[in-house]
Each structure stands twice: as structure tokens, then as C-alpha cells.
């Protein structure tokens, strides 16, 4: 059974940093691209970033380019999102999703950026 | 960037009705269009992949069609448990994008 478990969310002040993790199980992690998608409270879904199975292909949404860094550790079956220079508009539930077609999603972790 | 526009934004329906949700892409995305259901306080769940491919475990009343720029999600004989938000998502080009969502309410 595919399982994705995000962690690392919380309350952070504007300009601060957080590192999200997504622990994966139930599939061959290194064989699949992985994505981060976020959802502001009460709003729709926004794609954030994607990383290829080997970690060599990485892309970001313009809204986070230069501030967020996606990475993965295939030996630990874990996906990461390092978030720096956080802004109020980054407040959202952050989901990790498996594969380019996002066939499985984690339960999400809430990031709140507020002073 | 491919803009996905869903219609309607909201639909209120009675059980056993059939509903159709439309997703229009701002450029040709082939069949790289996926549909998700999201219930309150839950993560999105994949319903249909690559425009029309069914997903194991998803009820057969959910179906998808279309290619290029025009896509539809059809729910036949709606049930109370289908009350949710529905999103389309394209994986054809970067950046990946989502439609704004369609909220389905059961009367």
C-alpha cells in the first residue's frame, strides 16, 4: 500500500524558514518523480515543485523560485522541501504527491506564516 | 503557462442525477489531464488519469473524456458521498497547473 507522510509544518514568522519532509513507502521511491502541491485555507490547489526520480530534473513554480528547494534522499525514501524567506502568502497545507500524474497524495502538513 | 478553466464553479444536485464538469485548457495538452476529488479536510484523490483512464477502486459512475483543450468529468447517478470539490490537473507542460475547482453539493 502506497503511503506518503508529510511532516515539518508549523507557525513561522515572515522571512523565516521551514523544512518539510515526506516519508514514502509501498512503492519503489527512486522510480518516480515526486511533487509538492499546496492549498491555501479555503482555496484551490497550487503546484509548487517537481523532482525526477534520480533528483536530476527539478522545476519550480515562479511564485517560489529562488526561495524553495526541493530534494530527495532515495536511500531514505524521503522527499524534502526547504522553504526560505517565507511570506504570508505561503500559508497553506502542503502535500507531497507521487508521480507526474499525482496518483497518490499525503495527508498534508500546515504551514502558517504570521507574526 | 497552461491555464485550466473549470465550469461550473458550483453545482447543487439531487441524488441519482448525472452531472458533467468541464475543464478547458488554454493550449493543446493532448490527453495529459487528470481529475481529482477532494472532500472536506481530506487530501485529493485521483479519479481519472490521462483524460479517460479509470482508476482501480474508483466507482464506475465516474468517467472522463476529451483531448486537446476540452475535457469532461461525468458522474452518473450521483450519490450523497460524492459531495466534494473536483479539480482537473495537467501534466503536459511546466509549470504544472490545476483548474480552480468545482464544488458539488447534494440537495
Image: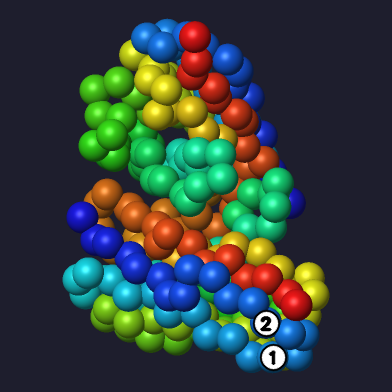
Q: Is residue A5 above or below residue B2?
A: above
- Residue at 46% in and 42% down: A37
Residue visible at 61% across and 31% down in the picture: A109
Q: Residue A86 occupies which quadrant of the picture?
A: top left
Confirm or deny contact between disc 1 and disc 2 (CB under 8 A).
yes
Question: For mark 2, what is the residue?
Answer: B13
Q: Which mark, residue A96?
A: none
Where residue A47 appears, as percent x and y from the top left, is 39, 45
B90 vs B18, left or right, is left
Q: Residues within 10 Å of mark 2 (few under 14, many from 20)?
A: some
Numbered disc total: 2
Look at 28% across and 34% down and name the residue there: A63
Q: Is residue B64 above or below residue A115?
A: below
**What kind of element bears circle 2?**
strand
Task: Using residue A24 as the reference point, say whether residue B30 is left or right of it.
Answer: left
* Circle 1 residue: B17
Amino acid at each position: 500500500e502506497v503511503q506518503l507522510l508529510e511532516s515539518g509544518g508549523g507557525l513561522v514568522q515572515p522571512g523565516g524558514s521551514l523544512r518539510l519532509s515526506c516519508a514514502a513507502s509501498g512503492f519503489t521511491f527512486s522510480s518516480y518523480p515526486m511533487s509538492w502541491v499546496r492549498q491555501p485555507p479555503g482555496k484551490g490547489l497550487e503546484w509548487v515543485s517537481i523532482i525526477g526520480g534520480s533528483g536530476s530534473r527539478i522545476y519550480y513554480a515562479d511564485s517560489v523560485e529562488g526561495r524553495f528547494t526541493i530534494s530527495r534522499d532515495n536511500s531514505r525514501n524521503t522527499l524534502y522541501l526547504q522553504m526560505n524567506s517565507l511570506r504570508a502568502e505561503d500559508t497553506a497545507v502542503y502535500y507531497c504527491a507521487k508521480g507526474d500524474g499525482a496518483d497518490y497524495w499525503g495527508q498534508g502538513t500546515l504551514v502558517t506564516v504570521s507574526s | 503557462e497552461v491555464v485550466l478553466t473549470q465550469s461550473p464553479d458550483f453545482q447543487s444536485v439531487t441524488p441519482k442525477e448525472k452531472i458533467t464538469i468541464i475543464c478547458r485548457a488554454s493550449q493543446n495538452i493532448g490527453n495529459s489531464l487528470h481529475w481529482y476529488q477532494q472532500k472536506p479536510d481530506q487530501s485529493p484523490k485521483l479519479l481519472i488519469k490521462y483524460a479517460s483512464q479509470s482508476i482501480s477502486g474508483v466507482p464506475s459512475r465516474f468517467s472522463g473524456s476529451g483531448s486537446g483543450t476540452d475535457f469532461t468529468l461525468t458522474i452518473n447517478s450521483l450519490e450523497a458521498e460524492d459531495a466534494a470539490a473536483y479539480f482537473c490537473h495537467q501534466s503536459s507542460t511546466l509549470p504544472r497547473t490545476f483548474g480552480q475547482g468545482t464544488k458539488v453539493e447534494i440537495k
